[in-house]
Image: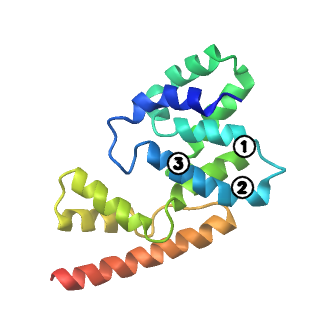
């Protein structure tokens, strides 16, 4: 496995201009959720794939070729490279993961930060985008509430809790600002 310093040195420039909800701290939060989810599947998964894919997941959609070139330059086999790329793609919220590693990383991405995080992330991201509070609430209602899916039972439970909290929070917030 490559050292974390090598991986972070490669990925850092891709995260420097991202907001605080999508920078390298986002990857650390996702990996924290991975640790929780992977416990049940310790003997079935390649954790290295998940770690690499987690770091690449925030820019795979723009720079897949650069990631592959870098992995190749580090002596990663073509087979392993393909798996890393697959898992990075499967981690995207809109994707339907097929591999167990992809399901773990996808679901960790969905449950990152715990019960209150959907709201915190949405409010901060809306503010960074220059949205009004009402625009952010509309975005949450249209794109967050009752959207997304987790594939592992332990993740579904956490995601359902997030969704329930978010619905109650938005309902209460809307009543308070009317």
Instruction: Residue at 29% x, 62% y: name it.
Output: 123
**Mark 2: secondary structure:** helix
Q: Are marks 3 and 1 in contact (CB under 8 Å)?
A: no
Labels 2 and 3 touching (C-beta < 8 A):
no
Left or right: residue 50 versus residue 62 is right
Single out the mark in the foreground, 2 or 3. Answer: 3
The answer to whether 80 appears left or right of 94 in the picture is right
> Which of the marked residues, 1 or 2, is nearer the chain's N terminus?
2
Disc with the residue nearer the chain's start (2 vs 3): 3
Mark 2 lies on residue: 38
Q: Position of residue 108 (x, y in %)?
A: 58, 55
Relative to 167, residue 37 above or below? above
Task: Report, in whole angstroms, how far the alpha carbon at label 3 lies from the one at label 1.
Answer: 15 Å
Residue named by callout 3: 28
- 3 or 1: mark nearer the eye: 3
Query: How far apart, in angstroms, are the residues tagged by discs 1 and 2?
Result: 8 Å
- Residue 41 position, x and y percent, is 78, 55
Determine which residue is flagged by label 1: 47
Observer-nearest of 5 and 164 = 5
> How many other residues sit within 10 Å of disc 2, few (<14), some (14-19) or many (≥20)?
many
**Upstream in the sequence, badge 3 or badge 1?**
3
The residue at the point 50 percent across, 51 percent down is: 93
State the mark number for residue 81: none
- The image shows residue 77 at horizontal and vertical percentages of 73, 20
Where in the figure is residue 171, as x and y percent of width and height?
31, 82
Q: Is residue 140 above or below residue 57?
A: below
- Kindly identify the residue that appears in the image at 41 percent across and 65 percent down: 118
Position of 13 relative to 91 (above/below) = above
């Amino acid at each position: 496995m490559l050292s974390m310093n090598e991986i972070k040195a490669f990925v850092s420039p891709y995260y420097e201009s991202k907001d605080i909800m999508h920078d390298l701290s986002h990857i650390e939060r996702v990996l924290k959720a991975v640790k929780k989810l992977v416990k049940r599947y310790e003997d079935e998964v390649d954790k290295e794939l998940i770690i690499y894919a987690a770091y690449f997941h925030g820019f795979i959609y723009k720079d897949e070729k650069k990631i592959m070139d870098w992995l190749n330059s580090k002596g990663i086999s073509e087979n392993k490279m393909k798996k890393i790329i697959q898992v990075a793609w499967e981690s995207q919220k809109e994707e339907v993961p097929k591999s167990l590693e992809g399901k773990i990383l996808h679901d960790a991405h969905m449950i990152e930060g715990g019960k209150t995080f959907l709201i915190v992330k949405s409010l901060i991201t809306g503010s960074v985008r220059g949205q009004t509070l009402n625009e952010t609430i509309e975005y949450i209602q249209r794109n967050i509430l009752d959207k997304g899916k987790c594939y592992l039972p332990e993740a579904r439970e956490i995601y359902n809790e997030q969704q329930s909290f978010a619905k109650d929070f938005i309902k209460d917030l809307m009543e308070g600002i009317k």
